[in-house]
Image (tube, grey):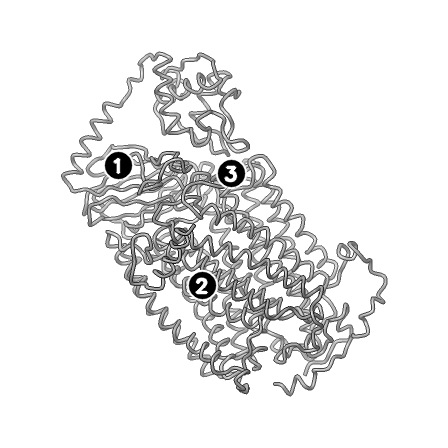
Amino acid sequence: MTKKFGGWTAALLLALHAGAVSAAYQLNLTPGVTKATQIIYDLHNLMMWIILVIFVGVFSVMFWSVYAHRKSQGHKAASFHENTTVELIWTIVPVFILIGMAWPATKSLLDIRNTSSPDMTIKVTGYQWKWGYDYLKGEGEGISFMSQLSTPQDQITGAAPKGEHYLLETDTHVVVPVGKKVRVLTTASDVIHAWFVPALGVKQDAIPGFVRDTWFKAEKEGIYRGQCAELCGKDHGFMPIVVEVVSAEKYSAWVADQKKAMAAAADDPDKKWELADLKARGEKVYAANCVVCHQQNGQGIKGSFPALEGSKIATGPVGAHIDMVLKGKASTAMAAFGKQLSDTEIAAVVTYERNSWGNKTGTVVQPSDVKAARK
Amino acid sequence: MSAVIDNHGHAHGGAHDDHGDHGHHPSGLMRWVTTTNHKDIGTMYLWFSFAMFLVGGVMAMVIRAELFQPGMQIVSPEFFNSMTTYHGLIMVFGAIMPAFVGFANWQIPLMIGAPDMAFPRMNNWSFWLLPPAAILLVSSFLVPGGGAGVGWTMYAPLTTQMGPGMDLTIFAVHLLGMSSIMGSINIITTILNLRAPGMTLMKMPLFVWTWLITAYLLVASMPVLAGAVTMTLTDRHFGTSFFNAAGGGDPVLYQHIFWFFGHPEVYIIAIPAFGVISQVIPAFSRKPLFGYASMVYATSSIAILSFMVWAHHMYVVGMPVAGQLYFMYATMLIAVPTGVKVFNWVATMWKGSLSFETPMLFALGFLFLFTLGGFTGLVLSLTSVDVQLQDTYYVVAHFHYVMVAGALFSAFAGVYFWFPKWTGKMYDETLGKIHFWLSLIFFNITFFVQHFLGLAGMPRRIPDYNLQFVEFNQISSIGAFGFGLSQLLFLYIIIKAIKSGEKAPQLPWDGADTLEWTHLPTPAPYHTFENPPFVK
């Protein structure tokens, strides 16, 4: 408690001494690593100066009045209550101040919104609660992966100490080359999300059924972190974004690695699987896609997300189960995984769900079954 | 001005009514259920709003307790989401709006010399729609799936994923909207038709003007909200696709409709608050309001502009640049009439004879902090800066400066100011001042640091955060607990004053010069102005 007390007293002191800014007590916008963040940072500072001047002007008058025109000091009230000239002055002068603000604001906006002639294009898709990335154009075209929170659960519950990048770390990074204009297309598969990376000066809503765009050109290598910025349900606070800006050579190397990895990971869709192998694979798919709602123990969250153990779908006819995973359930958080997962992955996760916890159906779903169900 | 007060300082008109000789109205609980008296209804509105303020306040405490430390300690993420949702809905629709309708009910007839509201029975119904709405809102926590975790803005399509709690919330919003519309019709009719002889529109106290303008805003905007939530309801249950892209709809359409209501709503809350402040500051400056006519024009301009700026809440949905520029310019323009109001209030104080009783302290707190909220609004109006700040804690800080330090402080100022007139008792001035200073200090501890969180990029509506945000969140939570506890002091002050407060003098504030102070006894009797006064 003493430590906490010390903590916030120190914070108050720091806030008073605005000069002393540590990373933990950041008092201003991030200067960022793009031209856009620099423009925004400068515009915001300019605004703060203008506001400070108006603030001091208005409130020095008010506090002078509070100090000097007190009844307890014997001050007698004047009786004036109208002056058209004064009213006109304090209507017109602010208009000119606002025009003075609007000019740089307009210029900055036109700079920031210009998404033309990008060097590469990445499509970002928001899912509950992870991000999907597809490199559409430029070097790396065809790379496609999911990215989700990698902070372990026991850090969140407090069972383990929290790391430096607590809640701002992901299993895969969005890697982009330094100094290249990257156009970002945003969309979503379920509800509205927003792709927000402060150091890149980018925030764009990702809207299901529509594509929006924004862009950034990082001028410094490094790792930049952000979060979903639009309430998207239960785990809105747990779908971070990590962008890794690297040199052109490193980027080329990364692209080559990714292509190799993708080729290696591609499953033979006609392979016949054994139950144990499929279940092991399914456990991984379950952990990556299903566990946030249906939980590790398959019990779901009462009232919000149904249990899978003993459920009609997970123990009933297999066709309905595959359908549910492929197409989702309208008007619920149950997403259609058909576009996110391969036939093998869906076969694996369905098999896992039908043969885990108390579910003992013994069903083995083969990728070919899923392929058939897609039609 | 003091000469005017001397002329009218003695009570007359209706004092003989204060004997309960109108025996045909029921007593006990049925008095309150069946009452058509504007004072009873005003009192019920105020108590209702205070009760909801406590409920919404407890939710805020849950939010701040969870955010006191990083990691998930107290609630689950989905419960946290429902806390932010109902905290917002209850504070906006259950606490702040009914509080000012309570002021309107009590004060408008007294200030314009009318015997009651124009439609007393509808007035009863407008109030009695509120408790069922509150019950619907709160009971959504008891149905399967619990309260809806969608934010008070209820954005589609997240709303389609929620359980039946969402439907209860939608019906509650319908009821609240009906109540507001009926209340507004009543207020407009009362002000336009029941003014005392001689009281022209431009002689009305500014509080009455602000409510006339607010009532028009309500009538124009509440049906839009009702439409938005009804479309949500049919999207949820009846297969429509207003907000579903797969069926040809558009999720962003919901936001346009919601904010077409939502931005006027901000002024529905703020404008009556301006009205209270415009009564309190002249009274304690002992000097007439500076620039009365320009205040009326400025308030009207704010109201009209409020319908033209809605999409500044949506700068990052992906509007065309031309749209962003238009909404930026229109939004910046609101600073002009708002500035005029602030300048007029300061000019009213200038060369006055100021004293600082509790109502004046809250009014000054309002003036200072509301202006800060206005400044951050100006920062947010700049589209490019908003790209960094939209949906961060900066926005949370901004609107709490406007809603709490603005509307709530103004409501406190109004309660302390009119309490002697309503009850005939004085509150404890020392405790009132302590209430003010505690509220002021804890408010700023809570919300000032949230600007820094937002600037550093902490999104709003998240139950857990990175370690870089720890310190300011802890400061904010400590401030919030202090602010919450300070409001229990307010409850104590009010109950103490009602039970054992000193008898209020006829004119407790020597600078107050509106009809309720000059033409009526203190406390105001049950029936007033049965014979209208003549206003010179």
Question: In the image, what residue type sits under mark 1?
Answer: Tyr
The CA span between labels 2 and 1 is 42 Å
Question: In the image, what residue type sits under mark 2?
Answer: Gly
A296 and A139: which is toward the camera: A296
Question: In the image, what residue type sits under mark 3?
Answer: Thr
Residue B210, given in percent of the width and then of the height, sits at: 58, 68
Residue positioned 25% across, 33% down in the render: A143
Q: Are marks 3 and 2 in contact (CB under 8 Å)?
A: no
Give neighbour class at mark 2: few <14, some 14-19, many 20+ (Cα, 10 Å). many
Q: Chain of mark 2?
A: B
Residue positioned 49% across, 41% down in the render: B74
- Give the labeled residue for mark 3: B160
Q: Is residue B243 left or right of residue B121?
A: left
Q: Is residue B396 left or right of residue B525?
A: left
- Give the labeled residue for mark 1: A135
A287 and B185: which is toward the camera: A287
Instruction: Name the mark nearer the viewer: 2 or 1.
Output: 2
Co-location on one chain, circles 1 and 3: no
From this view, report whether residue A39 is shown above or below residue B167: below
- Give the labeled residue for mark 2: B373
Q: Chain of mark 3?
A: B
A168 and A143: which is toward the camera: A168
Q: Is residue B433 left or right of residue B246?
A: right
Find residue A374 and report its image quarter: top left
Q: Chain of mark 1?
A: A
Residue A302, given in percent of the width and then of the height, sits at: 54, 31
The CA span between labels 1 and 3 is 31 Å
- Which element type, helix, strand or loop, lies under badge 2? helix
- Which element type, helix, strand or loop, lies under badge 3? helix
The CA span between labels 3 and 2 is 34 Å
Residue A137, given in percent of the width and then of the height, sits at: 23, 38
